[in-house]
Image (tube, rainbow, N blue to C red):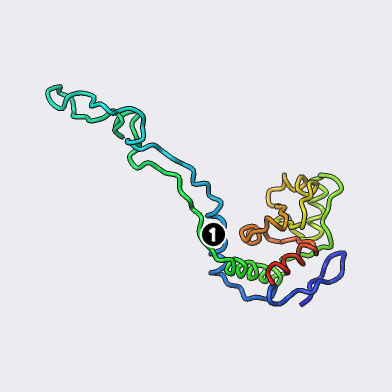
Amino acid sequence: MELNVINGSALDLSETVFAKDFNEALIHQAVVTYMAGGRAGTKANKSRSEVRGGGIKPWRQKGTGRARAGTIRSPIWRSGGVTFAAKTRDYSKKLNKKMYKGAMRSILSELVRSDRLIAVEEFTMDAPKTKELLIKVNELAGAQDVLIVTEEANDNVALSARNLYRCEVLTLSKLNPVSLVAHEKVIVTKATLEKIQEWLS
């Protein structure tokens, strides 16, 4: 299958990568796994056993007229421990490489089928100008909700898109399923598409 490249020659795409069926369950699993892996999970509270002090009984058990107490670090006391203390945890999920690649093939195939994947010979900016990038994106994609994928990092493109709400710029190494499904259109350079095809073949 062939894909038209703007300002360049047509690119021959492999049907084993860009003509796969839409597998919603697999894509959902890949998206959930990627998002879960990005969670910090660093919150932590101290339980009553971890709070400093409180080793001595505050007062004797009987005869004071006050409620019995065994430690000043009880959760019901001020500056005491937390009853169900939150602990650091790892939210990441396991996804086989074969499944991840299958999900990426399915997403890219759907983008091609729905004419949401736009291939360009190259995507560069002479200077970091948001207005110029906006004009360029509208000409290429006819939309402002776009993902721009380049092979190498381009500071001018990244700085130009930084202030646009629905415009994201990624290099090939940072490409992920969440960004691919989140945007209306995806603009990819020809060299990047060739690398993606090589990776997923």
Q: Residues within 10 Å of mark 1 (few under 14, many from 20)?
A: some
Q: Is residue 159 above or below residue 177?
A: above
In-image side of 47 versus 118 (left or right): left
In-image side of 188 versus 25 (left or right): right
Where residue 8 appears, x then y in whole percent? 87, 66
Residue bearing the label numbered 1: 33
Q: Is residue 86 above or below residue 105?
A: above
Q: How many marks do you count on the picture?
A: 1
Name the amino acid, label 1: Thr
Where, quadrant-wise, is the N terminus in this rendering?
A: bottom right
Where residue 107 appears, x then y in whole percent? 64, 67
Which residue corresponds to the image point at 87% horizontal and 64% vertical from the top-left? 7
Question: Can you tell which quarter of the image residue 96 is in?
Answer: bottom right
Which residue corresponds to the image point at 64% horizontal and 66% vertical from the top-left? 104
Question: Can you tell which quarter of the image residue 87 is in?
Answer: top left
Q: Is residue 172 above or below residue 88?
A: below
Where, quadrant-wise, is the C terminus in this rendering?
A: bottom right
In-image side of 178 versus 170 (left or right): left
Where residue 122 appears, x then y in whole percent? 83, 59
The outermost residue toward the left is 63
Circle 1: element type? helix
Where residue 145 appears, x then y in whole percent? 70, 56
Question: Can you tell which quarter of the image residue 187 is in?
Answer: bottom right
The outermost residue toward the front is 55
Which residue corresponds to the image point at 65% horizontal and 75% vertical from the top-left? 20
The outermost residue toward the top is 64
